[in-house]
């Protein structure tokens, strides 16, 4: 694309298209097919996202444009590389480096044993990639294991920048409908519209916890329930802990629940791991550790050293046998919201939890049917091997359809709120 | 100020600047302003790496596109390219009879020279400012749109793609990229233009920009420098109106700069400083040279 005026010379634009040898289709993405290809110029395997043009009333797809504009500026070993972007036969093709797997597949694969050093390595790469984004003033806003792709060399890379935005402007308002619910920070769940990089750090903390537990840590079935789950684990925040929370638009008072000792939630984690985790899970976003500070935490310099990426355990490749199905039980004791989500209504936590937990599980099951499609329709630059072999995904909510249309509306109408801005 | 040495330090200064955000916030609040101070790094941007040229580069590019259009004119008798929605372009149908073309040729329209092309571009760049002002868009929308427009016409002659169409498509793309979405229909309606034309040109514009879509207009650098100058000169509350004037005049200077080749020649920080210097010549608020000295000496003493 760097060549000047590729469109002016038809032979040249043909060559660009001929540069890639098409291989198998990897899946149907949210805005088109993703297929594998070989870059004849470099011999590299690539994943090509095909975005249909001329089918949108508003020209080139928004999400795709966001991804292109940001990835063009972000070059880091822990960020997915956008190799090329060009129109071809009525489509816009985005060429990414090919990634073998993703962190969700690793976490779900019960045949994989993750040692403390392995977890440390995955977390280090996640935080380094995130710190780089924040240094470049980009919020990812959709951090989850499924968007952390893993290359053939074991390197983990942040991908899917379709929800990402530039931040750093005081008083700029954003939508709070970002992240899959289980990874949403408490300030977002309370409706914050002005937020910063701390939202990504919270999500990274959830991923850290998920690596330790091998299941999603806080599996809320609604936004209210998500907050309930957070408070049941870490205790309901007291005012001195998070003075600004009462000013958030959707703030609701929750019944006080004491914090559970982190040690009891993560019995296998080291003291350093728990210390880092507690700093990443700080309620007050101003107090929450930054991605950069987190990546320099002593957890990463203490023994055991992080596993070298090339030596990390990986899910079996196509053709190898997949034995056990993952058992995914949300054993988290779920508090239950007893009053409708209105401001200043008191929400009671059911500390007994068992009955409530069943309910939550059922809801999870129902949700799964609706969302399997949204899960399978969301294909990143890797193959979901489990799906190919008919293994069912756990009920992992992405943004549900209601959220999505709301979000779409929000994002497209995300007008400047500073009309005098120069 | 010597350009090459000033270049690096000004860029670093404005775009690598983080430590002062808190202070800036305080100052911004004091001014009752919500102006923005920070953005993705200019240092490592595609803007800095690929879109800042020497005057000679620019001249060669303008001559090359001009020559190509003239050749097309000689070959086909017309220069305007057909653009398809997928970004592909087709050359005009030859307008001459094939039999004894040489003798039957009608007289060709006279092609534009590079100076005339330049005038055409400036005319439509002014139109971008007018249209954006009429829609009441945030100021950075016109800045981004003009930079897109300039970059587009490094690849093409105004004889090949009509600047009226490209201008509107650049405004549309700028709104999209700056997350200030306006529908193509709304934009077209506002100025009685066919919105389908805007959409048809979107891909050819994006492609001609090499999909490098984050651009740095000098407006934000003006904000940053004014904040920093206030820290340096410590104005009293009574002087704040003067500082507001300083900033406004500087922004008007930038508006003028945007109609020249300067945004393709210099980084935004330098353009902002130049605008502030001129603005200060009008308002005579501070000793500007002393401020510049202070930036450069700080720059020299820091390892970056």
Image: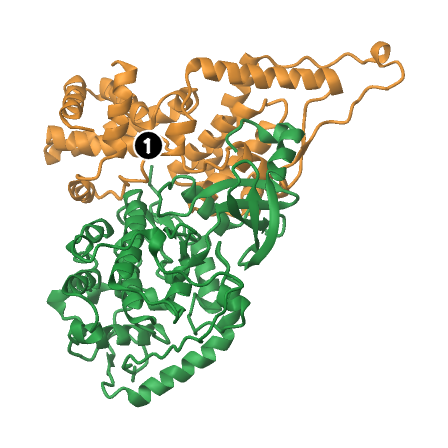
Chain colours: A green, B orange
Residue B268: x and y in percent read: 33, 27
Q: Is residue B159 left or right of residue A337?
A: right
Element at label 1:
helix
Image check: A164 left or right of B239? Answer: right
From this viewpoint, is residue A175 visible? yes
Q: Is residue A383 left or right of residue B81?
A: left
Q: Residue at x 32, y 46 (%)?
A: A133
Q: Provide residue B155's location: percent of width, then percent of height.
A: 55, 25
Can you tell which quarter of the image residue A74 is in? top left
Is B168 or A241 nearer to us in this picture? A241
| Left or right of residue A270: residue A49 | right
- Which chain letter matches label 1? B
- Identify the residue at horizontal 51%, vertical 74% (top origin): A370
Above-or-below relation of B14 to A371: above
Instruction: Name which residue lies at 30% across and 76% down.
Output: A342
Does A347 sit above or below residue A37? below
Residue nearest the observer in this picture, B66 or A331 = A331
Examine the image and state in which quarter residue A132 appears.
top left
Q: Which residue is mark 1?
A: B219
Residue A287 pos. (x, y %): 16, 57
């Amino acid at each position: 694309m760097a060549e000047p005026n590729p469109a002016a010379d038809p032979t040249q634009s043909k060559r660009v298209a001929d540069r890639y040898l098409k291989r198998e289709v990897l899946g149907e993405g949210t805005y088109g097919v993703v297929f594998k290809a070989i870059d004849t110029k470099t011999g590299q395997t690539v994943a090509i996202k095909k975005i249909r043009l001329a089918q949108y009333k508003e020209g080139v797809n928004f999400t795709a444009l966001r991804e292109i504009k940001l990835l063009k500026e972000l070059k880091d070993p822990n960020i997915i590389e956008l190799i090329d972007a060009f129109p071809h036969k009525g489509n816009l093709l985005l060429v990414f480096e090919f990634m073998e797997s993703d962190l969700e597949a690793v976490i779900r694969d019960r045949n994989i044993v993750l040692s403390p050093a392995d977890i440390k390595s995955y977390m280090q790469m996640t935080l380094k990639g995130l710190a780089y984004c924040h240094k470049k003033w980009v919020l990812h806003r959709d951090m989850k294991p499924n968007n952390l792709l893993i290359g053939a060399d074991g390197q983990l890379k942040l991908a899917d920048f379709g929800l990402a935005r530039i931040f750093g402007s005081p008083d700029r308002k954003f939508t709070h409908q970002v992240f899959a619910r289980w990874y949403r920070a408490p300030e977002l769940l309370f409706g914050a519209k002005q937020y910063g990089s701390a939202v990504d750090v919270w999500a990274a903390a959830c991923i850290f916890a998920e690596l330790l537990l091998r299941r999603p840590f806080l599996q809320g079935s609604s936004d209210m329930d998500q907050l309930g789950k957070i408070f049941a684990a870490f205790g309901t925040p007291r005012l001195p802990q998070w003075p600004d929370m009462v000013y958030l638009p959707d703030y609701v008072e929750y019944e006080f629940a004491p914090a559970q000792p982190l040690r009891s939630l993560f019995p296998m984690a080291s003291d350093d791991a728990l210390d880092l985790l507690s700093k990443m899970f700080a309620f007050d976003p101003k107090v929450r550790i930054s991605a950069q500070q987190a990546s320099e935490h002593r957890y990463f310099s203490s023994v055991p050293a992080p596993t070298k990426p090339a030596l990390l355990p990986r899910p079996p490749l196509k053709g190898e046998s997949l034995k056990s199905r993952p058992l995914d039980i949300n054993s988290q004791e779920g508090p239950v919201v007893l009053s409708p989500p209105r401001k200043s209504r008191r929400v009671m936590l059911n500390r007994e939890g068992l009955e409530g937990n069943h309910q939550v599980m059922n809801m999870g099951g129902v949700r799964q049917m609706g969302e399997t499609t949204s899960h399978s329709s969301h294909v990143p630059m890797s193959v979901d091997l489990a799906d190919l072999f008919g293994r069912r995904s756990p009920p992992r909510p992405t943004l549900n359809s209601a959220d999505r249309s709301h979000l779409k509306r929000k994002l497209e109408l995300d007008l400047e709120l500073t009309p005098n801005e120069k | 100020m010597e350009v090459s040495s000033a270049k690096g330090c000004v860029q670093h200064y404005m775009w690598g600047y983080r430590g002062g955000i808190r202070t800036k916030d305080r100052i911004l609040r004091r001014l009752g302003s919500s102006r923005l101070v920070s953005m993705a790094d200019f240092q490592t941007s595609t803007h800095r790496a690929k879109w800042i040229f020497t005057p000679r580069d620019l001249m060669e590019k303008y001559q090359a596109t001009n020559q190509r259009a003239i050749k097309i004119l000689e070959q086909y008798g017309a220069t305007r390219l057909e653009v398809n929605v997928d970004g592909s372009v087709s050359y005009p149908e030859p307008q001459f009879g094939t039999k004894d073309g040489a003798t039957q040729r009608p007289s060709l329209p006279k092609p534009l020279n590079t100076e005339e092309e330049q005038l055409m571009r400036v005319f439509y760049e002014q139109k971008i400012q007018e249209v954006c002002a009429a829609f009441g868009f945030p100021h950075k929308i016109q800045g981004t749109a003009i930079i897109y427009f300039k970059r587009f016409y490094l690849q093409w002659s105004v004889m090949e793609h009509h600047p009226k169409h490209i201008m509107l498509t650049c405004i549309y793309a700028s709104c999209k990229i700056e997350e200030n979405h306006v529908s193509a229909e709304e934009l077209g309606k506002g100025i009685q233009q066919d919105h389908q034309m805007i959409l048809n040109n979107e891909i050819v514009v994006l492609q001609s920009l090499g999909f490098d879509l984050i651009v740095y207009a000098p407006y934000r650098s003006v904000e940053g420098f004014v904040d920093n100058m206030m820290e340096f000169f410590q104005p009293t509350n009574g002087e704040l109106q003067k500082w507001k004037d300083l900033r406004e005049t500087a922004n008007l200077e930038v508006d003028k700069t945007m109609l020249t080749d300067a945004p393709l020649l210099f980084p935004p920080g330098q353009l902002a400083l130049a605008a502030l210097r001129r603005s200060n010549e009008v308002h005579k608020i501070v000793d500007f040279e002393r401020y510049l000295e202070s930036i450069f000496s700080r720059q020299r003493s820091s390892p970056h």
